[in-house]
Amino acid sequence: MIKVYIYIFVLISTVISAQSVFTRVRDQNATKIDLVVLDSCNKAGFCKDSVLFYQALIAVRMNKPTEARAAAKQLQRVYPNFREAHFVNGLIYLTEKNYAKSVNQFNILIDKNPKHVKALYNRALAFGFMEEYDKAIDDLTACINLRPMYSLAYYSRGYWSEYVGNYTAAIKDYETTINLDPKNYDAYLGLAYIYRGLKSTSKSCEIINDAIRAGSQMAVEVKDNFCR
């Protein structure tokens, strides 16, 4: 089963009164309360372009595409030069599984800013779901070149490498992911599945035990499948 992770890039607010809300958005802990606060900032005219942007991002996270699209549409209408609107639209299309349109939106942003790591990362997700695996891996490699400690990019590249059968590359990326982020339990499971497929039972069991020590409940539940 293909796994999707949407990690949202946001701008840093310059409005002190709304800073706490924007910080929570960046920490991916947005709530309905935040939407109320952002709405009040919107009505007051505080940094309205950023407010609309964050409203759209929160709506995406809350799986409310209609609200997200409304905020993004208003953002583009009022601030046509606000580039991050394309990022929001790309995320909306991605969650709606309209991958071609998602790629188009990310393309617009990346053409203007080739170093936009989050746009590259999410375009890689869209490419992967479109079964354009080489393009997905290329985008993730670009992410890693720009941000060498980006553990999720290593994990995702490892995932797509595993998916196309390049187990050597996948193993390397999963191991790098674990070194950078020992709490990425999916990387342990990915490694364990590869080694089990390669008939290395002892190695796959070792990795599952490592995952359990790292705190993975899933590894506890599936241990019997790897350690016999």
Image (spheres, grey):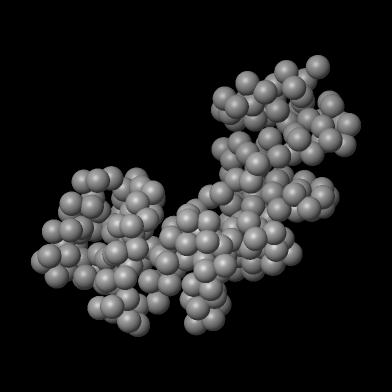
For the point 28% across and 78% down, the residue is 77
Q: Name the spot of residue 84 as percent of width and height, x first.
A: 40, 72
Q: Is residue 204 left or right of residue 198?
A: left
Query: Does residue 106 appear anywhere in the picture?
Result: no
Residue 107 at least partly seen: yes
Pick the residue in front: 213 or 1.
1
Residue 211, compared with residue 162, is above or below; it is: above
Residue 176, above or below 51: above
Q: Residue at x 21, y 70 (%)?
A: 48
Location of residue 33 in the rendering, given as x and y in whole percent from the top left corner: 21, 46
Relative vertical location of residue 191 with respect to residue 213 in this rendering, above or below: below
Q: Count all numbered tags in the image, as a single digit.
A: 0
Query: Residue 24, how many percent across, how many down?
Result: 31, 50
Viewport quadrant of the N terminus: top right
Q: Nearer the viewer, residue 142 or 129?
A: 129
The residue shown at (77%, 20%) is: 227
**At x 65% / y 60%, what residue is drawn?**
130
Kindly give the residue lying farthest to the right in the view shown: 199
Q: Position of residue 65 (x, y in %)?
A: 37, 56
Task: Give left or right: position of 181 versus 86.
Answer: right
62 and 192: which is toward the camera? 62
Quadrant of image for the C terminus: top right
Q: Is residue 7 left or right of residue 192?
A: left
138 lies left or right of 72: right
